[in-house]
Amino acid sequence: MIDHKIEKLLLKVQKPGRYVGGELNSVIKNKKDIEVRFAFCFPDIYEVGMSHLGMKILYSQLNEVPYVWCERVFAPWADMEEQMRQNHIPLYALESGDSLADFDIIGFTLQYEMSYTNLLNMLDMAGVPLKSSDRRSLSQLVVAGGPCACNPEPLADFVDLFFIGEGEEVDCEVVELYRDFKRKNGTKEDFLAAAAQISGVYVPSLYDVTYKEDGTIDTFQPRGNAPAVIHKRVMMDLDKSYFPDRFVVPYIEIVHDRAVSEVLRGCIRGCRFCQAGFIYRPFREKSIDAIDRQCRDLCENTGYDEISLSSLSTSDYSKINDLLDRLMAWTEDRKTGISLPSLRVDGFSNELMKKIKAIRRSGLTFAPEAGTQRLRDVINKNVTEEELLKTVNTAFGGGWTTIKLYFMIGLPTETLQDVEGIADLAQKVVDAYYNHPNKPRGKSVKVSISASSFVPKPFTPFQWEPQDTIETIHAKQRHLLSSIHSKKIEPSWHEADTSFMEAVFARGDRRLGAVLLEAHRRGMKMDGWQDFFSLQKWLEVFASCGIDPAFYANRKRSFDEHLPWDHIDYGVKKSFLMEECKRAYANKTTPNCREACSACGASCLKGGICVESR
């Protein structure tokens, strides 16, 4: 579907396979049969977007609706964007080659705050007006969903409606409503008012916000019949939830180039820094039969020879050993590998180790998150040093020599002693290897430690906490480096500058719309990539807008402050998050959902582990 003019440009760019379409299992439809054209936009490059499971699910589901054609649109890399702008070629969808401006609905998935400038740049590349108030007709409706939609306010000026929660049902309901309005030549204003009545839909233009003198929110008022609270949508029975039997297979290598089967949603653990662990509650599992069937279908229809069992914590699947037995019964003969990401330190048993050993021999990754037991209790990690050392000893006995440990720097109440604890714990893992009686002969150990900067996120017990300043994070990173005394330990960390901006937009309000617009005018984009990100440019933008980014990132918030996302309900009570924050400062842990119900509020959703445990 790509025309000759675009083909010429592909000779001048890296990785032209990003821009050609026509892959196996991509969907082509006759435009004459289509009433609603939906552009599924991922605001990052092809290799990242094509790895995203949510896009695979919703792309296939929408294309099963006869009157809908869903197509894929990705952000081009700088070389392709330069060629497109020079040759007046608008941003186009891969299936048809048509401009993004030709679509009825333009949908974005929001996975990362630093992709917000890409959203604006993608609209601009197609000549679509950026602000929702400047798009008057029903066409070119801009919608968005995904985890970052839990605080939609920074994008309120640009997005017409947000999907709150899981999209399998609500997306289709909105598309059906759109078709009805399009048939009767309805107005955008009337459509948005009607869409706001669908559970899980938030229309920001239907709400008025006022601010106090100190910059915090004073009032947040709905207009007309808009609901005061928007409740998330959730798919309670994952066996009955839509899942495709095939994925689009890319021509080029992507980040996660394998079949992916979702085994569960949610998390039982309640780590106090983890947004996903709260917004995806309650914990729900698929049956072994469903997972096995979906894995078989995907392998047969894509040709992939590796399956990734996807979840927030795969080893928390209650029947993980039985599941692996079922999958290995046919994957071994077909020489199909099985990948288990998200393993817990306390979920790595001898039985599981033997199964993993049979299906994968790459390094193992665990996430203690903090270097001392005190700080692990603060964040409710519920993992002890003894459990970690027992786990790595099991791994070393099984032949592994490479261990990666994930930590965070800048967690609430963290001290330099806690930072030293990261290096100390890594050293104990190294020592455990050399003291192991059955360690692999002739091999040395490698322990990688990755320390990301803590970012306070909405809907977590730490949503009120300040982020460490960039200078403090840098000092802690230097202290960590000076605390490492073994060449067997390889440290790395995320840039504090990027984490600072992530915190700003994670907890921002509507006033950040002006900042994003000014950043776009100055050509800022691809901020998730170090090749493009510039903190200095961002600080200049904030200064020009008269807004202090530290107000959003580095300020501790009181429990009685009206937060920008307080009108959104993800099923977890704000009072519970407050109590968890207080327990953090008391170094008290909370049991996981299998051990005891902590009355977080998710039982109001009437399903998952909340019901099973009762």
Image (cartoon, grey):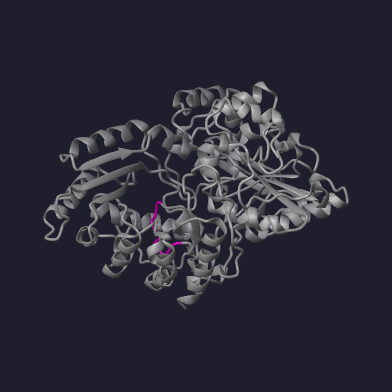
Q: Would residue 122 be found to the left or right of residue 493 on screen? A: right
Residue farthest to the right, as pictured:
184
Any magenta on residue 496?
no
Q: Would residue 383 be found to the left or right of residue 529 on screen? A: left
**Which quadrant, please, contains the N terminus?**
top right
Q: Residue at x 44, y 47 (%)?
A: 464
Q: Along the line of sight, which residue is nearer the eye, 24 or 556?
A: 24
Q: Residue at x 17, y 55 (%)?
A: 440
Magenta stretch: give its range: 267-273
Which SS does the magenta portion mostly show? loop
Q: Along the line of sight, which residue is nearer the eye, 49 or 186?
A: 49
Q: Position of residue 118 (x, y in %)?
A: 58, 34
- Total tally of numbered discs in the picture: 0
Q: Position of residue 395 (x, y in %)?
A: 24, 59
Residue 511 visible in the shown view? no
Residue 457 visible in the shown view? yes
Q: Along the line of sight, which residue is nearer the eye, 185 or 258?
A: 258
Q: Along the line of sight, which residue is nearer the eye, 114 or 560?
A: 114
**Relative to 359, does residue 78 appear above or below in the rendering?**
above
Q: Would residue 66 be found to the left or right of residue 219 on screen? A: right
Q: Position of residue 476 (x, y in %)?
A: 27, 36
Q: Residue at x 79, y 38 (%)?
A: 136
Any magenta on residue 272?
yes
**Relative to 287, does residue 196 appear above or below in the rendering?**
above
Q: Position of residue 305 (x, y in %)?
A: 46, 57
